[in-house]
Image (cartoon, coloured by chain):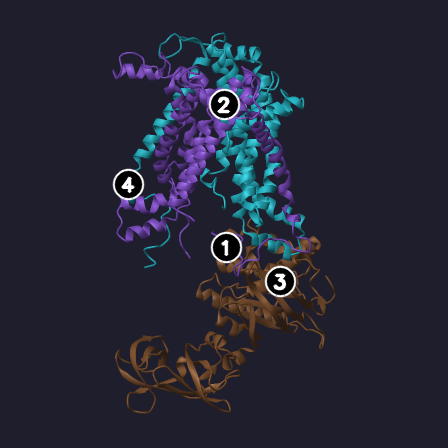
Chain colours: A cyan, B purple, C brown
Amino acid sequence: MSQILARPAPRARAADGPSWWVYAAVGVFALLVAGIFLSALLNSFASTWFGGWLPDAYTTKWYRFAITEFDLGYVLAITILVGLSVTVLSLALGVPAAYVLARQTFPGRSPLLLLLILPMLVPPITYGIPLAAMLYSARLGGTLTGVIIVNIVPALPFVVLIMTPFFEQIDPNLERAARTLGAAPIQVFRRVLLPIALPGVLAAGLLILVRAIALFELTFLVSGARSQTLVVALYYTAFAAGIRPSQAIDAMAVVYMITGLIVLLAALRFINPVNMVIRVRQ
Amino acid sequence: MQRAVGTQASGDTGPVTSGAPRRWGPLLPIAPALLLVLALFVYPFLYGLNLSVHPLGALAKGGMLANYAAFFGDPRERTSIWNTLRLAVPVTVLDLVLALPLAYRLRRPLPGQRVITGLLVIPMTLGTVLLAEGMIEFFGPAGWVNKLLLALHLITTPVQFVHNYTGVFISLMIADFPAVFLVLLGYASGLDPRLEQAARTLGAGWWRRLRRVTLPLLAPGIAAAAALSFVATFSVFPSAVLVGEPAGSTRVIALAAWQAAYEQYDYPRASAIAMVMAAIELLFVAAVLAARNRAYQGPTIGGRG
Amino acid sequence: MSAETVVRSSGPGEAVQAAPGRKIGRVEIRGLTKRFGSVVALSAVDLDVHGGEFISLLGPSGCGKSTALNCLAGLVDPDAGQILLDGVDLAPVPPERRGFGVVFQSYALFPHMTVAANVAFGLEMMGVRSDAVVRRVGQALALVHLEDLGDRYPAQLSGGQQQRVALARALVIEPRLLLMDEPLSNLDAKLRLEMRLEIRRLHQTLGLTTFYVTHDQEEALSLSDRIALIKDGVLRQVGTPEEVYLHPQSSFVANFFGYRNLFPVHVDAMRGDRANVSAPGNLRLEGTARSGVEQGMDAVAAVRPEDVEVLPAGSAPGIAATIEFAEFVGDAFECSVVADAGAPFVVRTSARWVRGAQVVLRVDPDRLLVFPPE
């Protein structure tokens, strides 16, 4: 009897059925996305493109145009700065919170968890507009600080959501063992907890960075002319599409995409998405 | 290594604390996060709620709920709910239907596993704005899709894919898919394969295994993915503007709120609309959770009792 | 660390010489009580353990033995009661300053450190100089026969090897007490036997006071100087292996040590410690009553399978019964029999009985124990 229920097969077996459809489906999807990206990419390098399959001629002038006209370099710097700040701050706040949630049982734990995750479940507009109003009245509206602050709100739940199950899966006996061996709580944290948790923290951080770069609504409500992230700037220029040449807009879009892609690929190198199990003890 | 956390049965000691003052000390690290959420989320939310029941101008005579009444009373405003639901629900359902078999199949490694997962997840970097922007080219009348369809003689004149409902629909499908897929993949890979093997040895064919074992076990994942997806798609904003018809069929509710705030400078009314949005989303999430609890309650990792 | 720690000589395997009459690692547990919510894990446990003694806490799952160990380690604060080590109350001492060696059931090896680093951890926390650390880690690994594996990571080791690393890590700090929580339960049968011998050898070499939690009576019997039996948080009996095995004081303890036949009886008459008991179906037996049994009460009778004599029907007076089936267990047959009166028995015989055979069962009154009900 134990033979039948032996170790699960490590690879998909023939009994699972044909797997070509997976490759086909993924292929179609990838083609779509690639097509969208390539269109923008090619257009950004096109001097003119009048309805043929490919541009008529190529140039890099649109990138130079975007850099000067849209201040692309500055916007990119702002985007990275915002992304990193949001990531670091939400990790600093969220990781300790996740640890407490994972290790302690106390009355009110479930409601507290729900509260911390709530900002992800509610449309940003609902708290975004009043929050923007608050920041403006605190004279933080339109500033970099304001943009950073406002983006922490949806990032924090994400950290808690990812890190809590992560901490739960670390054997609590490890901490107990360290204590019986003479380690004070600080030493337990430094020598045992931190090294083990670091990969998860880094992975979460990378994912947050990706999201922070892509997050639109809140930055849109709060940013000023000098504190727009790439995605908001892109929106503004696309919105004024009639006035701006589409090639320049696409140049900007391509830069935006490359930035995000680099971060995501870095993230995927270190983590297997399967490990990002978004399950929390209810 | 499956461990029961926090059990007070014979093996466990409970919380990793010691010494005399244990009540609140260990919980301190959670305070900063809590404060932030309270200050920057709960408070603005309540502030907005409060704002919404203090109508401005002409509506002030209508009492506290005047903003809401105005919203539901105006057909153009009311329709925005319908416009948004018309997008959010099909996209959520369709993305679930498409992602589920893929996630289920990929719970065990295939050759090229990481490439596949990477490819499916890449749109996460794009975000709706870039997708929308790129779609204008790709799906435009002179774009490659139309060219291909024309070349294959499937159509005779270019199809209008963008600047309408279809455009927003497609952009949401693509943007939403990675998140749904990841959540489902996470739950699917947590399924104990021995449960399905047991069902097979008991004589269940693939359909019955699906219906009676796999889907109920995946119910929490499906619910989570559905909730996440609906929340994201219902809040749609930039793509509704860029590749949709913001003045017409894709005038989504987020747009209505934004216009109230920044075009008409009526913050109370904008807040009211935002509250309606939040209410609908929370309603949906609650409904999904209730349905899930009816389908299955308990862990997805197999019964070792 | 105070001067009262165990003094080890410099090489592994040399016996520890303790000054005669000196108390090393004497533990007194008084009224230890712990509740988790509405569940009482420990209820007023009293126990005195001599220095150098190996005592097992034996009981079924959930009986509180692990909780007791965690209280000793300082990982859990008791609700009431005291733990004294060599006369000193441990209550104000946090776990990181108790200096006890703890071996967890799951080993709890730090996955991100090598074997050597794992073993060195406690020494580093104590502030031992690095050359001394290296030397002592080497000695500890040699003690558990893992000299060459210092650079490996726990994930690269087998279960048995991991267990020995956990032991080395606990022993290298020269602890005043050794606390082990079911350390062998994750190992397969053969490995378990090997490690049992290892643990015995280490105890004889080092002479540390050891608390050993287990649910396996065989382990407890072979390793311990004394065994403490716990059920539902209550200490039921403490004694040497011979004492608890031969003279169990309750049906709970008896059941643990091989008295597999337990059945409810009524005490009809008593003379001294002899009791005449009867069971439903006109089953009459004579047995030895333990304390707490009185005439006229309902009680529990217990007898070991090997103490039941099986004879062909009609050959002698006794309980009439029928053989259900017989299992060959290597050195004997274990038969399941049902008395005509209805009570089931497990018996051991040297002959193979056929299913359905009619037999007669006889029990020596000295070997049938009668206990008060649980």
Disc 1 and disc 4 in contact, CB within 8 angstroms: no
Q: From what the image shows, is residue C69 above or below residue B165? A: below
The answer to whether dots 2 and 1 both sit on one chain is no
Instruction: Kindly identify which chain the residue marked by label 3 belongs to.
Output: C
Tell me the amino acid under the disc marked 4: Gly
SS category of the residue bearing label 3 = helix
Disc 2 and disc 4 in contact, CB within 8 angstroms: no
SS category of the residue bearing label 1 = loop
Q: Which residue is mark 1?
A: C157
Instruction: Kindly identify which chain the residue marked by label 2 belongs to.
Output: A
Q: Which residue is mark 4?
A: A17
Dot 3: within a 10 Å radius of its alpha carbon, few (fewer than 14), some, or many (20 or more) residues? Answer: many
Indicate which label's residue lies in the foreground, 1 or 3.
Answer: 3
Tell me the amino acid under the disc marked 3: Cys
Instruction: Kindly identify which chain the residue marked by label 1 belongs to.
Output: C
Q: Which residue is mark 2?
A: A258
Q: CA distance from mark 2 to mark 3?
A: 57 Å
Disc 2 and disc 3 in contact, CB within 8 angstroms: no
